[in-house]
Image (spheres, grey):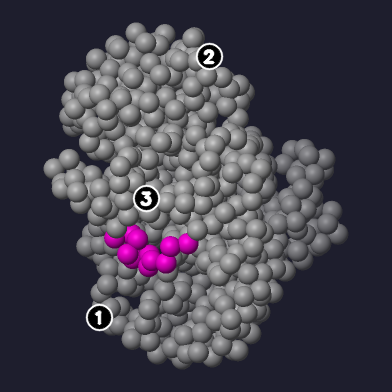
Amino acid sequence: MAFQIKQTRWLYISLSILSLCLAFTITPVKAFPPVTTPVFSSSQPTNGLQQGRNFYQSGRFAEAVTIWQTAVQQYHTQGDRLNEALSLSYLSLAQQELNQWQAAQQSIEQSLKLLQTSIPSADAILWAQALNTQANLQLHAGKAETALESWQQAEKFYEQAGDKMGSLGSQINQAQALQSLGFYRRSKQQLEMLTQKLQGMPDNEIKISGLQSLGLALEMIGDGKNQQILAQSFAIASKIAAKPYLSSILISLGKTAVDLQDPNVAFDYFEQAQLLATNPGDQLQARLAELKLFLDYDKPELATALAPQLLQQLRELPPSHTSLYAAINFVATLNRQSNPDQILPLKDLAQLMAVTVKSAQQIQDAQAEAYALHQWGKLYLRTQQVSEAQELVQKSLDIARKLQANHIIAQSAWQVGQLYKQQSDRSKAITAYTEAVNALKALRGDLVAINSDVQFSFRTSVEPVYRELVDLLLENQPTQAELIQARELIEALQIAELDNFFREACLDRTQQIDQVDPTATVIYPIILPDRLTVILSKAGQPLRSYVTHKSQAEIEQTLDKFLVALNPVSDSQDRDRLSQQIYDWLIRPAEGDQAFIDTKTLVFVLDGRLRNIPIAALYNGKQYLIENYAVALSPGLQLMATRSLHQNHLTAIVGGISQSRAGFSALPAVESEVKQISKAVSSSVLLNQKFTSQALAERVKSSSASIVHLATHGQFSSRLEDTFLLTWDGQVNVKELSELLRNRGSDPSKAIELLVLSACDTAAGDDRAVLGLAGLAVKSGARSTLATLWPVKDQAAAMLMIRFYDQLRQPKITKAEALRQAQISLIRQTDFHDPFFWSGFVLIGNWT
């Protein structure tokens, strides 16, 4: 069963005097227990401030705001500037939890102004708290560099105040800011340094909390050590009998096991978490996680036994931010099922959402109200009570608009669009869907901050919005405007997938792809539920579209069979028949329409499982596609403009591993490949022991080479954690590799022109594995990437690569044409004429 990658941003907010560390998300549900040895400021907090903190910690943020606003006024009247500044800092935190970003900004600015002008001798802890709060706002506003500086200042003040937990939290937040800036290796170094620092500390509750926070941070960057760190945190908590920590750590370990697709281990963790829980909140979170596990792994009988108990527990909870989201999470989990009424009566779920809406109004949590209305509307829709559903979802959308909460707008506007579609009101449906897509585009980087506990996963809540709108736009005979919008949506979906893969917004480019080359035609094949639509784009011409009426299941089945048939031992007639079938879908209608006249290069923006298909190997009955056209792939939308490769003065950094290493088999032909390429192209060589990540980073930074050629094991996957390249000193994950390859600063003229990966593989059984390849191609900053979809016999790979470089040296030849000529030479002049040996090589990005 596919797992859902968590999308929780790992920021830690210290509530000043108590040094309370909270996992900050847009819809927070997790809270780490407070440190039991608080550091008090020189001014003891009054009852009002303490009452506000109690409300904040119990998730009653609106009440905390009211209390702290009153405290601000009282202290201002009394002339107590220190406690006024402290109250304003607290107030900003609570306002952030309620999405009151402008008010939160004003509050923290007032607090800092008071500290700077009226309280020059203020305690360090007050400065630390205020700077920490400000940094969180700065990161939310996309000012990661400023946020980094603020957290560095906050760390110094926490150290000065002797607040170890506050200091650790600030350092973890600095790693998050470094991630946002694209400094992945620095971020990882920061977290590794923290790991060492924590290991040297005595076993106490600060160490436990620090390790738990660190584990969550490592998980978010795809570092597999997170499980080890969380396990250590649990071991220490058990050893010193720190019981309040045990349950929350076990829940984190359980969710990690779910991510690793190990449901039995996850179940054991969740069961232990319930047994060891010292408060009802932790027990509830463990049981909710268990319910989701049962449903995700098709165990309805276990879910049916657990769900009524959870319902009763949720009904008995007093209203708070945490209890509201627990109820929403519960209903959202069941709402994702095809038949939730087989687990609980729908009327019971609807009643729970009705109570949740009232409770949200009572504690002034408008965001929770909007979420609850959305889920409630979904329940009405299941019972065909369309008008009631529409009323609830419209209310959710109206609240979300007032809050400018794009994550809720996206979901509720989508649902409104679905309702209009059911009523056959195409125009209103398109308007609503467009609002949903615009909200998703506005989110971009913030998508990684949406809490998975309200079911905002990419595959279930983002991708379908785009696809359903494209389906609507391409109904019947689409107009030029509708074709243009559909094309833009498919391109935007490609970017959204890459953002989701990297867990951050990663694409901002400058040049529309159909304007790059007037001799190229861009092809967008779009797989819809009941048809395949192909849109053609050529510079200076109207868009064209062609439709093949086949079900998505039939199309995907054909694609899967073709991939299997590419194995050299398969029946070649069967392979040619399947290949010709796909050719008839993608190419033949446009050929019959004379659409490819004057076209030299076909550029494909591939959709879904088409990404795994070697397009160059499509067969028309007589010839392969590559024999008539150069072929390139694009992630869509915009590309960096290329610069001349100066064919007569090609320079390259060539690295690789020919020996067996770290459990990977030897690649004996790599040594020959590296030597022959270095003869064809002026090269700086890093082979075997010399091919370390540090040596590659230094060589990329110091060299002006336009080509980086890496012949080593690597894997592309739809999982960030499983996408890596092998160097002599270990695996380099795709984020670190992309940073390493961008190691020449921000000057676009110094970008790598061509990145070549000649021995990599796509993850077996992963139908979205090429996403990892496209991700690296885009994120590395290389204008073009040449890579393989599967491991090719290294002798054939070496032969193709050498011929590719020979062609690349010819004057006025494009990269796509150089690859085409190399592939044709294998087809016509060698024993490697079977498509398996040459068609897996794909060029991604700028083909000129």
Specify the label residue 646 is tagged with: 2
Residue at the disc numbered 1: 301
Q: Which quadrant holds residue 416? A: bottom right
Q: Choose between 725 and 103: the one closer to the eye.
A: 725
Where are the magenta residues, as a range?
547-557
Could you say where residue 724 lies in the image, as x and y percent from the top left? Answer: 34, 36
> For the residues marked 2 and 3, what is the alpha-carbon distance in whole angstroms?
35 Å
At a point 70% along the width and 68% down the height, the residue shown is 401
At a point 39% along the width and 48% down the height, the residue shown is 611
Query: Which numbered disc, 1 or 2, marks the residue that appears first in the sequence?
Result: 1
Q: Is residue 223 visible?
A: no
Circle 3 SS class? helix
Could you say where residue 49 lies in the image, as x and y percent from the top left? Answer: 67, 61
Specify the label residue 742 is tagged with: none
The quadrant in which the N terminus is found is bottom left
> For the residues marked 1 and 2, what is the alpha-carbon distance in whole angstroms?
67 Å
At a point 30% along the width and 15% down the height, the residue shown is 674
Q: Choose between 588 and 552: the one closer to the eye.
A: 588
**For the residue marked with disc 2, what is the amino acid?**
His
**For the residue marked with disc 1, what is the amino acid?**
Glu
Could you say where residue 15 lies in the image, as x and y percent from the top left? Answer: 59, 53
Q: Are marks 2 and 3 in contact (CB under 8 Å)?
A: no
> For the residues marked 1 and 3, what is the alpha-carbon distance in whole angstroms?
46 Å
At a point 25% along the width and 80% down the height, the residue shown is 301
In this rendering, the answer to whether 609 lies above or below 286 is above
Circle 1 SS class? helix
Q: Which quadrant holds residue 269? A: bottom left
